[in-house]
């Protein structure tokens, strides 16, 4: 019967933060570089987050005028899936945004400079040799890059230029490097890798420590390297990916209210 074409509002991912009562349906993301539950469709970005439109119809008209660029490519599909590390540019307003996670596991639409919008970080998912012996890598956002540096391995992160579509640097998956968690219970947290436990036949576990000294562990597949040492290659939210307890949050709110 083919792929499902509808998505009900109650089934939509929590981090889209849609209300329950303003309709039955939610926009189902198109097939694309990110999974349905790990992305935000363009219509929700423009209408619910950035408030550039009041209705889906208005989003359609904005996109049809070719105002929205995702990773330096014009996208006119209002349901195009925008996911982690994607760069959204709106030349008409001179704005650029990078999609990151906040410490609560929701997408954080991070405003960035023109200079930073020229590149993105991609995690290497696969390294292989194709037809005629041409080596290539596959990244987390579905890109295939031919003739990579032979030092690049699976789980490493590459710095990918959106202007020239080439690899301009890479950071290996090593102890002591800064990482962001992109899945599981610690989604959105950031920390320095302390050690990696190997479990043959099961999931490797990675132990990390954040800037506040909290230690946490997650599966290897959930770890996305964002910088070498403690410095990040991209600008990150002010919270630095530190997850606060309920009491810590309350005290910060009380201080700001005083």
Image (spheres, rainbow, N blue to C red):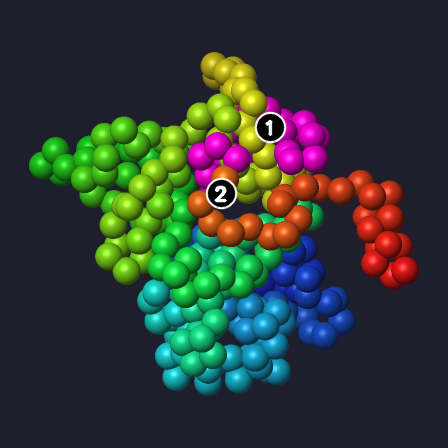
Report which residue position mark 1 lands on.
Answer: 208
Point out the tag, 1 or 2, that comes first from the N-terminus. 1
Secondary structure, mark 2, is loop
Q: Is residue 247 above or below residue 21?
A: above
Task: Give how far apart the Cα atoms at labels 1 and 2 are.
Answer: 15 Å
Whole-percent x, y for residue 249 in the image? 81, 48
Mark drawn on residue 47: none
Q: Circle 1 sits in a helix, a strand or a loop, which is it?
A: strand
Q: Is residue 70 left or right of residue 243?
A: left
Whole-percent x, y for residue 135 in the image:
19, 35
* Residue name at image x 89 percent, y 55 percent: 254
Mark carried by residue 232: 2
Which quadrant would the N terminus be assigned to in this image?
A: bottom left
x and y percentages locating residue 181 in the rendered image: 57, 39
- Residue under the point 68% across and 62% down: 17
Q: Quadrant of the C terminus?
A: bottom right
Q: What range of the chain is rendered magenta?
A: 205-230
Q: Observer-nearest residue: 224 or 114? A: 114
- Name the image quarter holding residue 248: top right
Name the residue located 67 percent from the left edge and 55 percent from the top edge.
14
Residue 2 visible at all = no
Q: Is residue 98 above or below residue 26?
A: above
Between 52 and 16, which is closer to the camera in this rendering? 52
């Amino acid at each position: 019967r083919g792929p499902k074409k509808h998505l009900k509002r109650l089934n939509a991912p929590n981090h889209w933060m849609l209300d329950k009562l303003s309709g039955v349906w939610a926009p189902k993301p198109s097939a694309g570089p990110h999974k349905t539950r790990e992305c935000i469709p363009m219509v929700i970005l423009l209408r619910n987050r950035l408030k550039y439109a009041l209705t889906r119809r208005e989003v359609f008209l904005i996109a049809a005028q070719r105002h929205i660029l995702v990773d330096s490519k014009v996208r006119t599909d209002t349901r195009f899936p925008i996911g982690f590390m994607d760069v959204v540019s709106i030349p008409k307003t001179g704005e650029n945004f990078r999609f990151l996670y906040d410490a609560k596991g929701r997408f954080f639409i991070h405003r960035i400079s023109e200079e930073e919008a020229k590149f993105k970080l991609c995690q290497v998912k696969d390294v292989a040799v194709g037809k005629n012996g041409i080596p290539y890598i596959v990244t987390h956002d579905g890109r295939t890059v031919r003739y990579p540096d032979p030092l690049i391995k699976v789980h490493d992160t590459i710095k990918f230029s959106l202007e020239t579509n080439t690899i301009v640097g890479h950071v290996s998956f090593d102890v002591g490097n800064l990482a962001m968690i992109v899945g599981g219970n610690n989604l959105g947290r950031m920390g320095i890798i302390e050690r990696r436990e190997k479990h043959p036949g099961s999931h490797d576990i990675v132990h990390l420590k954040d800037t506040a000294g909290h230690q946490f562990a997650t599966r290897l597949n959930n770890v996305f390297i964002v910088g070498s040492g403690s410095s990040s290659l991209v600008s990150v939210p002010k919270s630095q990916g530190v997850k606060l307890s309920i009491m810590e949050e309350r005290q910060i709110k009380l201080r700001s209210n005083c």
